[in-house]
Image (cartoon, rainbow, N blue to C red):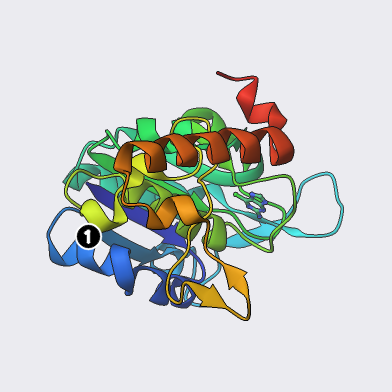
């Protein structure tokens, strides 16, 4: 999968994909992330990409021209399956959406800033608008990083048996069960004996029960989706 990201803050998106699973996904050639500084398509020599909003009011709006130039230039290289605008008024991201997006070949993500982008870009170029939750961030960059991570780890071959996504929370509309490692007794707090039993069938049953219980206690709303 190839993911292009348009941003006024490219520095903010340097590190998130240089570690751990995202790093490995790129090294394996399964994921390619390219961050593009929007100011490359600025309207003047001062690097301007935003302007005052019509009708008045505080806050700048990202202009049509730099965004369209960027989108059209990048679209010459590849056909995008989705042009995604990260925005707090978008559709809320969930595991199902990440699963769906992980099947695509080329994604273009636009990070909003200030008051957002000119509405005409949303109408004529953007194909999908995504929010990562009901709270406000200063810009779309951290949301884009979240989205790339959640998609990237689902690409076939990125995760191995040890890190398998099959048992992640949410993957089957259940939260993950509790996990333990050495020592067996820490300050008198013991690991559940079933996990030490060596009975794999029993252990799987226990984990499933724990998942169900945990989901009932903490997120009954996702159980309803079953
Ligand atoms: Cl995608 N952008 C911003 N600025 N804030 C958010 C968001 C996105 N998702 C949740 N809050």
Q: Quadrant of residue 49?
A: bottom right
Residue shown at the point (12%, 58%) measured from the top left = 29
Residue 81 in view here: yes
Residue 216 falls left or right of residue 49: right
Crowding at dot 1, Cα within 10 Å, few <14 / some 14-19 / many 20+, comes out as: many
The secondary element bearing badge 1 is classed as: helix
Q: Which residue is mark 1?
A: 25
Q: Position of residue 210 (x, y in %)?
A: 56, 41
Residue shown at the point (84%, 44%) measured from the top left = 55
**Position of 47 relative to 76 (above/below):** below
Quarter of the image with the C terminus in it? top right
Of 75 and 129, which appears nearest the observer? 129
Q: Position of residue 54 (x, y in %)?
A: 77, 46
Of 96 and 4, which appears nearest the observer? 96
Residue shown at the point (33%, 74%) measured from the top left = 19
Q: Quadrant of residue 122?
A: top right
Q: Position of residue 198 (x, y in %)?
A: 31, 51
């Amino acid at each position: 999968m190839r993911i292009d990201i348009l941003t006024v803050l490219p520095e903010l998106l340097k590190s998130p994909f240089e570690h751990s699973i995202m790093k490995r996904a790129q090294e394996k050639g399964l994921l390619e992330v390219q961050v593009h500084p929007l100011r490359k398509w600025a309207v003047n020599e001062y690097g301007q990409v935003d302007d005052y909003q019509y009708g008045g009011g505080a806050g700048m709006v990202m202009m049509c021209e730099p965004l369209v130039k960027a989108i059209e230039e990048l679209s010459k290289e590849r056909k995008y399956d989705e042009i995604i605008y990260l925005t707090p008024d978008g559709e809320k991201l969930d595991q199902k959406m990440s699963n769906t997006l992980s099947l695509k070949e080329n994604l273009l993500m636009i990070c909003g800033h200030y008051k957002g982008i000119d509405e005409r870009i949303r109408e004529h170029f953007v194909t999908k608008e995504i929010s990562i939750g009901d709270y406000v961030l200063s810009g779309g960059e951290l949301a884009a990083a979240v989205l790339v991570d959640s998609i990237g780890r689902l690409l076939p071959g990125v995760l191995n048996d040890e890190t398998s996504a099959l048992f992640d929370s949410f993957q089957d509309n259940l939260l993950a069960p509790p996990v333990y490692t050495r020592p067996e007794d820490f300050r008198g707090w013991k690991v559940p004996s079933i996990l030490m039993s060596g009975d794999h069938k029993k252990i799987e049953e226990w984990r499933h029960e724990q998942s169900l219980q945990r989901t009932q206690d903490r997120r009954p709303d996702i159980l309803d989706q079953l």
